Amino acid sequence: MNPLRIVAHGTPASQGSKNSYGKNLVESDKQLPAWRAAVKAAAKLAAGPNFQPIDDPVKITGEIRIRKPPTTKFHNHPAGPKDLDKMQRAIGDALESAGILTNDARIVHWDIRKVWATHMPGLDITITEAK
């Protein structure tokens, strides 16, 4: 498998925290649909038209770039919301939805960090075969 690099622009969102409205549970992060769409579009573009979904164990490395707020308790690292593991969940589901992975359960290793965006927020990840 050749490494697949995906660069997506947009506001990173998290997936997993829910709000309850009666019997209905909905994702709390209102930016999730737009973020998943941005990751999905970038993944499809990076993969190209004849890409076959990956059905082998993979490793994902890279970074999620967060827009730095005007004031923050943590100047050197985005150590506040949103949770990194919930952001990874949104990325995994977007990669499966894009047809990059047959199932996001194929991700056996994450090496992702949150960083302050120096230009545009988004992500820059590479998918490689897990060895």
Image (tube, rainbow, N blue to C red):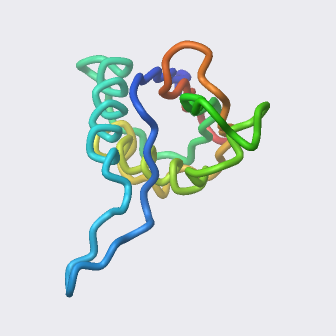
Left or right of 116, for residue 55: left
In the rendering, at what x and y percent does residue 47 appear? Answer: 36, 22
Residue 100 shows in the view: yes
Of 69 and 21, nearer the camera is 69
Q: Residue at x 38, y 41 (%)?
A: 95
In the rendering, at what x and y percent does residue 34 appear? Answer: 28, 38
Q: Which residue is drawn at 55% across and 13% down?
A: 119
Q: Tell how many labels.
A: 0
Of the 4 image quadrants, the one containing the C terminus is: top right
In the rendering, at what x and y percent does residue 80 appear? Answer: 65, 49
Q: In the rendered image of this protein, does residue 12 appear above or below residue 117?
A: below
Left or right of 99, for residue 109: right
Image-quadrant location for residue 127: top right
Residue at the farthest front position? 71
Residue 131 shows in the view: no
Of 70 and 49, nearer the camera is 70
Residue at the farthest bottom position? 23
Left or right of 64, for residue 21: left
Q: In the rendered image of this protein, does residue 47 appear above or below residue 82?
A: above
Left or right of 72, for residue 4: left
Q: In the rendered image of this protein, does residue 11 appear above or below residue 87?
A: above
Q: Residue at x 42, y 57 (%)?
A: 15
Q: In the rendered image of this protein, does residue 47 appear above or below residue 127?
A: above
